[in-house]
Amino acid sequence: DGGITQSPKYLFRKEGQNVTLSCEQNLNHDAMYWYRQDPGQGLRLIYYSQIVNDFQKGDIAEGYSVSREKKESFPLTVTSAQKNPTAFYLCASSPRTGGATNEKLFFGSGTQLSVL
Amino acid sequence: GESVGLHLPTLSVQEGDNSIINCAYSNSASDYFIWYKQESGKGPQFIIDIRSNMDKRQGQRVTVLLNKTVKHLSLQIAATQPGDSAVYFCAENLPPSGSARQLTFGSGTQLTVLP
């Protein structure tokens, strides 16, 4: 089945530790996105990538880093600089850039990150 | 309608009734709108979308209405079923089209279907 796979489903971070959230898609989508979801709030954009080897900061990029070495993969690292990392993290992709229909996002199942 | 904060608006409906979920969007220049359904602990699922050159769009059991005059969006679900229980949220996108970079998401409405 085509889709977006996020792993792990649950992740715990110790103070001072960096953790990496995985996101893989087999939809052949060009663009990929990371969002953070806090209870009772709308999704907030962390980073996005429209093409391999290129990515841009979103609205809340501080304390996070990403890479886009392959079209299929867009891992997110939550660094120790992120002081309030507890949240539900969602990866998404969209078909292509520059087209008329690529605002439509397809989401993974999410990773719940908690601080120990 | 949706609001920012810790407590989501809630809507309870009887199974088989129609549901109407409302969303007030913020920017009159937004030209694309999308509704998602999110079940607890899962990622959002696309329901239906609409562009600003339309007032209404229908899908399977769902209809989206757009009122640009008052910047209001609604999602109507016909014959609501227990499986429809979830958080529903809308998103608006600013032009230029071609990227989800400027999608702004609402906080959502919790729909509960009563037996």
Image (cartoon, rainbow, N blue to C red):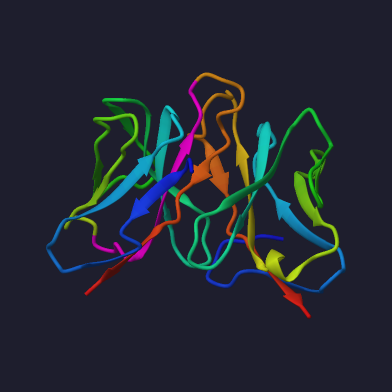
Please identify the quarter of the rendering in which residue A26 is found. top left
Horizontal placement of B47 versus B20: left or right? Answer: left
Horizontal placement of A60 versus B56: left or right? Answer: left
Residue lying farthest left? A16
* For residue A88, above or below residue B70: below
Horizontal placement of A112 versus A2: left or right? Answer: left
Residue lying farthest bottom? B115
Which residue appears at 28% of the width and 44% of the height?
A75
Please identify the quarter of the rendering in which residue B112 is found. bottom right
Q: Position of residue B77 (x, y in %)?
A: 80, 57
Can residue A71 be found in the magenta stretch?
Answer: no
Q: In this orientation, which residue lies closer to the viewer: A95 or A28?
A: A28
Which residue appears at 24% of the width and 36% of the height?
A67
Q: Position of residue A102 (x, y in %)?
A: 55, 29
Q: Position of residue A116 (x, y in %)?
A: 21, 75
Which residue appears at 65% of the width and 34% of the height?
B30
Residue range highlighted in magenta: A83-97
Q: Position of residue B33 (x, y in %)?
A: 67, 40
